[in-house]
Amino acid sequence: MRPMKGITHALTRVIKGDLNAKTPIYAKDEIGFAGETLNIMTDGLKERERLKQSISIAQEIQQILLPGKNPQVPGLDIAGKNIYCEETGGDYYDFLNIGEQKTGIVIGDVSGHGIGSALFMSMARALLRSRSKKPGSLSEIVGDVNHELTNDLENSGQFMTLFYLIIDQASQCLRWVRAGHDPVIVFEAQTNSFSELKGSGIPLGVNADFKYQEETEKGLKKDQIILIGTDGLWEARRCDDQMFGKEPIYNLLKKSSHLPAKQILDTVIEELYSFHDGLEPADDITLVVIKTKSD
């Protein structure tokens, strides 16, 4: 009975949260095997608890790196949101003050998700913020960041799609670099029409010497809605394997174009949750909505 009492006592301590509980092993029989299994189990639980704490810290740090609030920019109404499918992820967005009447919006999607992707995302964020403060064209900025990332993470197998948009209200134009990311959706409320901000470019982390091309569109319009997202939104699938797609987004933009950017964003996310019907997302989701204000 002594070995059984030892196992019972140790189990009681584990149930109460004491992961240092051990039971002495008196013999190499079935009871002794149960005791050894219990001791191995408690060691495993301790390791899982340490890992859980580490992931929790990583999650807190990553949330700090993402924008804590939407920027207040005269002439623009901007809202952003990020949803990770795990505790940490590789989706990234940021708002940068480039200069007078110039606002930078960056969104990226690292391959995969989890801690490895979160580390890649953190490195990319630091490089982009640092390089954006120095002189140079938008294509040079993205090219330099790509060069550093590729050299540092060579042979890691990871890469990051990126869309870097600058809204220049002084010259009334949009400038952007597209690095393997989905085109940006633009809705013109006045004409009830859609267009996309396209461009060529490969993801960051693939070719260190790739030359990125800066694109420009003149004639910034009032009541224009710009939607930038990651593919976790439109490629979301539910249990019957049906994909969310972009059509629901187009329809929602038409119906809610009169609403503020934050409400437009919330409407899209609510529609996605309704589509999922309780199913947890399988990929990270990031969405930024920019609306030009009327005079």
Image (spheres, rainbow, N blue to C red):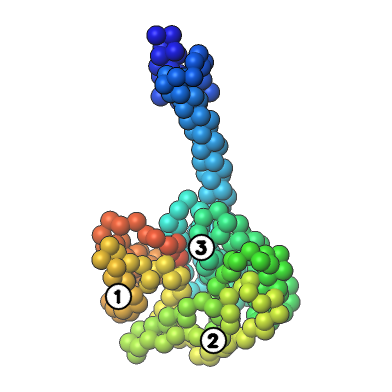
Provide the residue designation for mark 3: 112
What residue lies at 59% left-to-right and 69% top-to-bottom?
159
Q: Earlier in the sequence, mark 1 or mark 3?
A: 3
Q: Nearer the viewer, residue 192 or 82?
A: 82
For marks 2 and 1 on the same chain, the one whose residue lies earlier in the sequence: 2
**Residue 271: image location, x then y, percent:** 29, 66
| Quadrant placement of the C terminus | bottom left
Residue 138: x and y in percent read 65, 80
Front: mark 1 or 3: 3
Q: Nearer the viewer, residue 13 or 124?
A: 13
Crowd band around label 1 with a 10 angstrom C-alpha radius: few (<14), some (14–19), many (20+) = some
Visible residue check, residue 98:
no
Q: Secondary structure at mark 1?
A: helix
- Residue annotated with mark 2: 199
Image coordinates of residue 202 in percent, x first then y, are 58, 79
Say which quadrant the N terminus sits in.
Answer: top left
Amino acid carrying label 3: it is Gly
Residue designated by label 1: 248
Q: Considering depth in this image, is 48 or 229 the residue closer to the camera? A: 48
Q: Earlier in the sequence, mark 2 or mark 3?
A: 3
Q: How many marks?
A: 3
